[in-house]
Amino acid sequence: MKKEQSAKAIRTRNDIIVHIVLAILAVIWTFPIFWVVMTSFRAEKGSYVSSFFPKSFTLDNYIKLFTDTTILNFPKMFLNTLIIAVFSCLLSTFFLLSAAYCLSRLRYKMRKPYMNMAMILGLFPGFMSMVAVYFILKAVGLTEGGMIRLALILCYSGGSALGFQIAKGFFDTTPMAIDEAAMIDGCTRWQIFTKITLPLSKPIVIYTILTSFIGPWVDFIFAKVICRANADQYTVAIGLWKMLEKEYIDNWYTCFAAGAVIISIPIALLFLKLQKYYVNGMSGAVKG
Amino acid sequence: MNKKRKRLLAAAMSAAFLLGATGCSAGGSTSGSGEKVRLMVWSPSEDQSKDSGEWLQTCCKNFAAQHPEWDITFVYGVADEATAAATVAQDPEASADVFMYANDNITVMTDAQALARFGGKYEEQIRSTNSDALLNSVTLDGSLYGIPYTTNTWYMYYDTSVYTAEDVKSLDTMLDKGAISFPFTNSWYLPSFYFGNGCTLFGDGTQEELGCDFGGDNAVEVTDYLIDLVHNPNFVVDADGAGMAGLRDGSLHALFSGSWDYGSVKEILGDNLGAAALPTYELNGAEKQMYAYAGSKAIGVNSHSEYMVPAVELAIYLGSAEAQELHYDLRSVIPCNTDLLAQENIAADPVVIAQNDTFDRTSILQPFVSAMGNVWDPVANMGKAIRDGSTNHENAAEQTMGMNNAMNSNGIG
């Protein structure tokens, strides 16, 4: 009896220690986010504060961000980025999953060489080709005015098929027998892909959608090189960067924090919305 | 299902195109009967913003009205003076015909062969309305590469309720009577103390082969002074906006910055706003003058411009007294045209006085030789090391020598 109690006490004590450690880690991890959120509601201006908690709170930073558009047009940047990210996401998800499916299911002569080539190309950072990409886009007339959006969509989605490895690995775990059964029933390759492989691979589809949305959503370097002086085509990454330049920082710093909070919303929404499929898909792959 | 998805994708793609097309914005075109001219003009976004009076658009309209012989279509783009050079150099052919740049970037553009030289009557016109010091800031190997429209330097803002005009002549008096901040870890500001005691960069600023002279005994004396300065309780290192925050909460009474912070300082100090050129500091009993880096902002013309004559004429107009006066009225951009500076209302503005006094008296022209790129980091690191206490009186000589060596080396060979 006594022994049992002490075992329980030990367990309780261990739990307490573990939870305290976890709580401390959680505070450390969420601290920067918490700080940005608080700064976005800070009423005092300027980039430097002497106290951790703002002395007074306000919504003005958010209001200014969306109404004071003559110098830094945030709503427009937000819309630009959203359009670019949504279309890049659709395109690159399609490219990537298609490439992964072909490499997983089809057998043809150049399959192995292609995979090796993709692997090697993937080792180079994408921005290495930045200047070349700029001049190619310029040659086809995509670097002026509204075509910049299309140019950026192409940039972000064009190379996505090279990142097929994870999705291919996942498709490989689906037994070939299922495909064969479908084929005997008269399915085409396309139908197998859309009606069997994709529904069985929800986690990887969700993962692909998430990563291919976040890529263009947060990218700075390509947008900067391609937008150049076209201020009406700026994306939020460029806009937020501008807010920290010496001419703007004192006035725009708290708005910068507000902007940072706002751009995290679409990603958070996307993740929350897709998370349940993610977990469901992970729990069981193929059943009967 | 299949078809539907395809249609959806097609619709989505065409939507993207449409959105793209409507998002396209061309500049205003002015009706005229003459030769068709398309000029692309870049400026900082404030110059085009409605809230600050659309300086660029107004000037371009005036220019078009003065030149009925051309039917000009203006295309506006946004590039501030600091980044315009890099953007132009990236691809001169697809860049603006006329743009504004900070003079320290001049070699970036001449190396890319993107900057047109001014000659003949244009050169005479520019020379007749600008001071020699200003002209030197846009002259490279004897050729004139831009039309200066404002000086670019930093000076001192102070609280007139704490300091008198006499106090602000000496840094030590200021430290006795109030608290000040200085961007100690920023290498655009810190060398001002070293220049005061005879340190030089590239001889007169153009002799690259002479290198930096920041390592002698005179430099060590300055390092020792700076170590004491940082420990002064009335001295605050201004980094990440600490100076402005101190001014705002009243704990600081002076800060060193430039015209870009005028709006914020004015809002904080109101009628107590004072501005002055750099003070002197007392080094081993002698008064030494601080010297800021100075440069200019200028209007440049792209040497790849298809319409060279209209582009040069427009640049001349944007740099003219008329345009500078409008710039000053709308955005408080401090003019540099010598005729304009003689005008009473402008000559009496304390900020104009402070900036121009700094430019004329307490500054050195920021060298734009390419070896200048090696200078920034070692100086900033010196500032940080003194602040953190890792450079102290014991190792000041050695650390100063190390800084000088680093400034004279590109870090590779």
Image: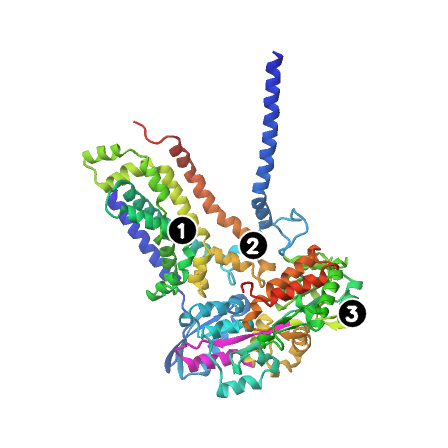
Out of A103 and A268, give the one closest to the viewer: A103
Q: x%, y% of residue A151?
A: 37, 59
A125 or B344, which lies in front?
Answer: A125
Which quadrant of the figure contains the N terminus of chain A? top right
Disc 2 residue crowd, few under 14, some 14–19, many 20+, Cα 10 Å: many
Q: Which residue is mark 1?
A: A123
Q: Bounds of the magenta span? A: B293-320
Amino acid carrying mark 1 in the image: Leu
Q: Mark 2: which secondary structure?
A: helix
Q: Position of residue B379 (x, y in %)?
A: 64, 64
Q: How is the image coloured?
A: rainbow
Residue pointed to by mark 2: A255
Query: In the rendered view, does B396 fall on the left or right side of A225?
Result: right
Q: Label 2 is placed on what type of residue?
A: Cys
Give the spatial CA distance, label 2 vs label 1.
37 Å
Do tag 1 and tag 3 residues touch (Cβ < 8 Å)?
no
- Residue under circle 3? B167
